[in-house]
């Protein structure tokens, strides 16, 4: 152990470069590796990069101390991958027996569909979509089979049931896995929830025997999730997901379908922002919808700028005023999209009070979400 | 920590003496594996019952503790770092002591006298590879040395000071979840640097009982040992099959006893007789 001053600084460009051209990393010094590993851990991209490097010719050129971190990250991710796979199997069978078609979303879907970003993809929970008319029977089935709701405040319960596109999280009694059961891809209270017919139409049965959205819908859902949420804690990781999906499915019909879904669900602006960032960061050459009219162009320019900074992982080595301001703007925007103004004011005052109370008590962990899948590391 | 290096970015000056005593002589490596902070709790808590928060690379794994327990929190935090990041080794909640190039694991529940025993052995010619965590290489079934202090509690603190008046022991943190706690080290960095991974030869489940008239020891069924070790593993659930395989191969190879003892000299002799031999 040694005592040192603050971690030395690191630039976001270096992180983008690490994802864009991982094999160039062999040039790094040990102290550069050190800060890169810390940033990757916070951004939840350590295992992703570990698998990419492990499958490249440069693995043996990486210093042993760094390889040890990467191989530990791979073990952990692989284990979580297996767990998601088996949980998926069980949930699938439970719900299918009730005539419900469960569609896995996001992290779980990548793992089930074995997309290019599946190796090393960590998930904090399993996301599942069912049709709204079978939501009640799905919840009841899960509750009868070792899944339960933790007690949450009455306000939070009301929030989920009345406003949200998902019910309060379900936890597995013995394994601690967290399951988010959705009936839509965005909050109905916002008035912006996409019409789901198109998304359901493309649902595919994967080789592993479970359902996910089709690639274009996965891509579009990831964008909705990234661009409409008030938090972008793992936003850069989501961009890496999108990069991988774009590279893997890069063909004419895929992009046509993405565009069609974006237009139908009125998220063209969000799609354009993401594609612009993918093109600038990772040398993509993806077709970007050209905005019509001056106000649209200005809006796009601003959104792209905000997200360019807001998506910088929240790690001390990367802190800047600009990223802080951008994250705050995303926070405000996220909330204003989520709910009508009156609902928002009410929601905000209640949350503010609860947050202030925890801060007063000095309890930084009181309101925190579970970070890892499963009841790991209870000690 | 020897096998790993943590850098402590911010810490209260009150723990400087302890940090210096325990880790002051480490030879730094170019790259650190962990980056941790010990920071005060909220602003109000700065004056009113001050608290300390452990943070590891932007994550806060525990609830805050009273300010006076800062050093103990750091040690527990470092345990957490190891247990949640090192999946290249099987990690058991166990002390590891080495003599004549053979390692013995002492997996035990809190309160079984494990730390007191490991301190006593460390003072009497054994090498303390670890007091808290056995770091086992799954390929070679060897135990790796850690440069970490032993965590001693309550009456043991005075005992250790009596056994070795010049022992390197930190100041006591009172009223922690484990009672009064101090940390003690029994080797310098120079001595630590000469240590090598060592073959594991035995596993002892120690149970201290001061009222015992006569020492008792038992052999244990392999299936029971297996279950015990799995329960003592920090990362069994992450390593999955590899952990199962490692534990099984280990049990197949080593001698295992449960020992009820009141006399520490007996334990020393027993270990030499039954497991490590008297060497050359």
Image: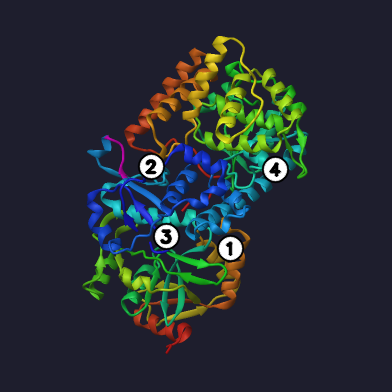
Camera-side mark, 1 or 3: 3
How far apart in space, not on screen, are marks 3 and 4 (Cα)?
Answer: 35 Å
Residue A110 visible to an observer of this rendering: yes
Q: Name the residue under label 3.
A: B4
Disc 4: CA contacts within 10 A as few (<14), some (14-19) or many (>=20): many
**Residue A9's disc number:** 2
Q: Name the residue under label 4.
A: A112
Camera-side mark, 3 or 2: 2
Residue B68 location (% of width, % of height): 25, 50
Disc 1: CA contacts within 10 A as few (<14), some (14-19) or many (>=20): many
| Residue B109 shown left or right of residue B14 in the figure | right
**Chain letter belonging to callout 1:** B
How far apart in space, not on screen, are marks 3 and 2 (Cα)?
Answer: 22 Å
Kindly indicate whether the residues beneath marks 3 and 2 are on one polypeptide chain: no
Please tell me which of labels 1 and 3 falls first in the chain.
3
Chain part drawn in magenta: B39-43
Q: Residue at x 48, y 24 (%)?
A: A306
| Residue B179 shown left or right of residue B112 in the figure | left
Q: Nearer the viewer, residue B268 or A121?
A: A121
């Amino acid at each position: 152990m040694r005592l040192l001053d603050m971690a030395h600084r690191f630039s976001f460009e270096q992180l983008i470069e690490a994802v864009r051209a991982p094999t160039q990393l062999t040039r790094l010094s040990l102290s550069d590796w050190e800060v890169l590993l810390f940033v990757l851990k916070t951004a939840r991209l350590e295992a992703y990069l570990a698998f990419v490097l492990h499958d490249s010719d440069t693995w043996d050129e990486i210093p042993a101390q760094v390889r040890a971190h990467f191989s530990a990250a791979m073990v952990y991710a692989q284990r979580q991958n297996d767990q998601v796979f088996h949980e998926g199997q069980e949930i699938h069978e439970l719900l299918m027996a009730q005539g419900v078609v469960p569609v896995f979303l996001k992290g779980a879907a990548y793992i089930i569909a074995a997309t290019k970003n599946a190796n090393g993809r960590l998930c904090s929970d399993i996301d599942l979509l069912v049709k709204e008319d079978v939501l009640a029977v799905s919840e009841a089935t899960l509750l009868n089979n070792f899944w339960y709701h933790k007690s949450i405040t009455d306000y939070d319960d009301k929030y989920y049931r009345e406003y949200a596109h998902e019910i309060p999280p379900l936890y597995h009694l013995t394994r601690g896995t967290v399951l988010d059961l959705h009936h839509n891809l965005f909050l109905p209270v916002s008035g912006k929830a996409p019409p789901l017919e198109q998304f359901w139409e493309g649902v595919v049965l994967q080789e592993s025997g479970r359902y996910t959205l089709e690639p274009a819908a996965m891509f579009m859902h990831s964008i909705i999730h990234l661009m409409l949420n008030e938090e972008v804690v793992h936003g850069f990781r989501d961009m890496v997901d999108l990069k991988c999906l774009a590279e893997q499915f890069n063909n004419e019909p895929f992009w046509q379908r993405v565009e069609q879904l974006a237009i139908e669900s009125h998220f063209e602006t969000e799609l354009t922002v993401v594609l612009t960032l993918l093109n600038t960061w990772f040398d993509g050459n993806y077709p970007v919808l050209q905005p019509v009219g001056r106000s649209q162009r200005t809006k796009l320019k601003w959104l792209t700028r905000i997200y360019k900074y807001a998506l910088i992982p929240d790690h001390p080595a990367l802190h800047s005023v600009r990223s802080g301001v951008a994250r705050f703007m995303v926070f405000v925007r996220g909330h204003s999209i989520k709910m009508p103004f009156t609902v928002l004011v009410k929601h905000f005052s209640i949350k503010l009070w609860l947050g202030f109370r925890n801060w007063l008590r000095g309890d930084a962990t009181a309101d925190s979400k579970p970070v890892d899948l499963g009841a790991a590391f209870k000690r | 920590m020897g096998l790993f290096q943590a850098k402590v970015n911010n810490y209260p000056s009150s723990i400087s003496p302890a940090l210096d005593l325990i880790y002051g002589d480490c030879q730094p490596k170019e790259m650190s594996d962990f980056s941790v902070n010990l920071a005060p709790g909220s602003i109000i808590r700065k004056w009113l019952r001050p608290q300390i928060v452990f943070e590891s690379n932007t994550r806060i794994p525990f609830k805050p503790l009273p300010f006076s327990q800062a050093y103990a929190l750091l040690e527990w935090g470092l345990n957490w770092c190891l247990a949640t990041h090192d999946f290249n080794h099987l990690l058991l909640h166990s002390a590891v002591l080495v003599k004549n190039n053979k390692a013995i694991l002492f997996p035990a529940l809190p309160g079984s006298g494990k730390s007191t025993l490991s301190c006593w052995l460390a003072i009497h010619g054994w090498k303390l590879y670890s007091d808290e965590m056995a770091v086992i290489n799954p390929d070679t079934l060897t135990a790796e040395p850690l440069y970490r202090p032993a965590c001693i509690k309550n009456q043991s603190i005075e005992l250790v000071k009596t056994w070795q008046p010049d022992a390197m022991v930190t100041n006591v943190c009172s009223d922690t979840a484990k009672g009064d706690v101090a940390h003690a080290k029994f080797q310098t960095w120079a001595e630590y640097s000469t240590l090598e991974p060592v073959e594991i030869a035995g596993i002892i489940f120690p149970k201290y009982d001061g009222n015992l008239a006569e020492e008792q020891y038992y052999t244990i069924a392999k299936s029971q040992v297996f279950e015990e070790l799995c329960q003592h593993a920090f990362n069994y659930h992450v390593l999955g099959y590899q952990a199962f395989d490692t534990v099984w191969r280990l049990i197949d190879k080593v001698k295992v006893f449960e020992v009820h003892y009141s006399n520490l000299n007996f334990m020393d002799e027993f270990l030499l007789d039954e497991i490590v031999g008297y060497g050359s």
